[in-house]
Amino acid sequence: MTSAEVTAETARGFARCPACGLITYTRRLVRTGRVCPECGAHGRLSAPERLAQLLDEGSATALPADDPVRDPLAFTDARAYPDRLALARRATGLTEAVVCARGTIGGQPVTVAVMDFGFLGGSLGTVVGDRITRAAEAALAERTPLIIVTASGGARMQEGVFSLMQMAKVSQAVAALDDAGLLTVSIITEPTFGGVAASFATCTDVLIAEPGARMGFAGPRVIEQTVRERLPEGFQTAGFLLEHGMIDMVVPRGELRPVLCRLLAVTRPAVFAEVADVVIRDPATLPEVDAWDVVRAARDPARPTTLDYATALLDGFVELHGDRLAGDCPAIVGGVGVLRGRPVLLLGHQKGHDTRELVRRRFGMASPEGYRKSSRLLRLAAKLKLPVVTLVDTPGAYPGIAAEQRGQALAIAEIIKQLCSLPVPVVSVVTGEGGSGGALALAVADRVLCRESGFYSVISPEGCSAILWKDAAAAPQAARALRLGARHLLASSVVDGVVPEPSDPAAAMAAVGDAVAVTLAALDHTDRRELVANRRARFRRF
């Protein structure tokens, strides 16, 4: 909605929701951030409205915007291009299709670039490209995170190939922030298409979409007319993008600020909390436990999942989704948060506590999308210099036909290789069962710990018994032959320590948090090159 339309609407005193037709008072609609109180449809915000919604009150300072009118092609269709610009300026009260500012969110300094669809469809021209580039350069100079709010039909046709060049210009400015280790976030709003979607909008660290927002390279009408196919329901909308691994989350407008505050918290310096060292390092202090009893305990559905640990141990946890290629595997979850005062990236297998969730999560058996999502998040950890914590609890990688078609072995191999060179501390905890290469993919770490009733194995006891005993019923015998259990893992130095398990579930989870915090603290002052060299030497010894 343009500034002029907002003024006219306010004068009328009421507005109609274009989605459900509800007529409501304009003042009420403004209070809800232009979200329909009946159906939740998100109306369009102008750039000034968006800045007021996102930034702390009174914190916004506009970046310089004294750009001249540019008409590189002397373009004229039904109207000369300068005349179109003049009309857009009068209609919106803006000088171009983006407004850039410095400000704070939850007290944290940020640089923000907000596109405005009301100005020539938010199209990407040379001035828009210059402004967003200068915003990225300001973020780089001041070492602040960059947040881009997109709303655009694509590159501006009236500026021809010069508009096309803005895709590369702004993208390289964002790439400079990658090199500097600065967080970048895109907020995808309705609509985001063409050259904007195919450049800077989707090359940031975190992609957040508003409900109902559409994003794609080609618009639905172009696709239907070109390929002559009917598009599926919800195609290119936020829900569709999340399901297909293209964005991290869908966040209603009223919840954007809290989510951004939690994301920004991981860019702050750590304030370490003192914790007790609970890690058991002497295998002789661990009791002998029958291997099959260990297996049954490790598989208990009541055991905490990765999301349980994230909720209990991390302040401000934000789950991130998608491999940016094809999907979002539900068997691996990951995100960022603060552990005992230390910002970390958490990755782990996710099972469930009941049959429905276990089935939905494939019993913690990850697909290629899960490992590729993990790989993407590990790159984010390396960029932001976040320690990595991985929680292992899986029978193994998912053995389905589709997983093989999408390169299961390649995805596992790639993440193992990546962890071998990751330049940040990595601590892994086997919290339940650690099955085969599907477990190892998240356990190439500087230090590997195991919960007292966890186990780690080349194969499941059922698989081993079926192959060697020719009888799956011999699984208990196979478990004993494989010497499954934390005591053997510690004695053979496969793990570096064992985390005790108090009978109280909350205390058991807290023990994992303390063990990880102590282990990370011991790695704090290790030079990054030495860290990688030591990690490689650890596995070279086996």
Image: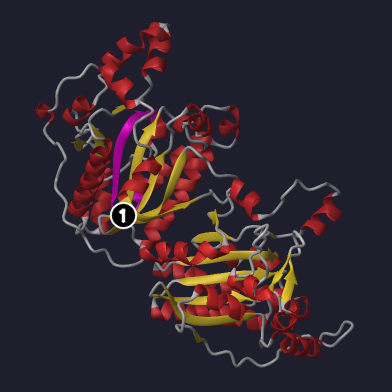
Residue at the spot of label 1: 387
Q: Position of residue 485 (x, y in %)?
A: 24, 24
Tell me if 276 is positioned left or right of 298 in this view.
Answer: left
> Is 274 placed above or below 445 here?
below
What's the residue at 76%, 77% (across, down)? Answer: 160
Relative depth, front residue between 52 and 520: 52
What's the residue at 86%, 49% (across, down)? Answer: 228
Tell me if 96 is positioned left or right of 419 in this view.
Answer: right
Residues drawn in magenta: 419-436
> Is 18 placed above or below 424 here?
below
User: Is residue 73 in view from this perspective?
Assistant: yes
The amino acid marked with disc number 1 is: Pro
Q: Determine the image quadrant of residue 151.
A: bottom right
What's the residue at 69%, 79% (across, down)? Answer: 125
- Give the colour scheme shown: secondary structure
Which element is circle 1 on?
A: loop
Residue 359 drawn in magenta: no
> Is 250 placed above or below 312 here?
below
What's the residue at 56%, 33% (across, down)? Answer: 403
Q: Determine the image quadrant of residue 274.
A: bottom left
Tell me if 1 is positioned left or right of 469 in this view.
Answer: right
> Is 289 placed above or below 448 here?
above
Relative depth, front residue between 372 and 257: 257
Q: Position of residue 173 (x, y in %)?
A: 52, 74
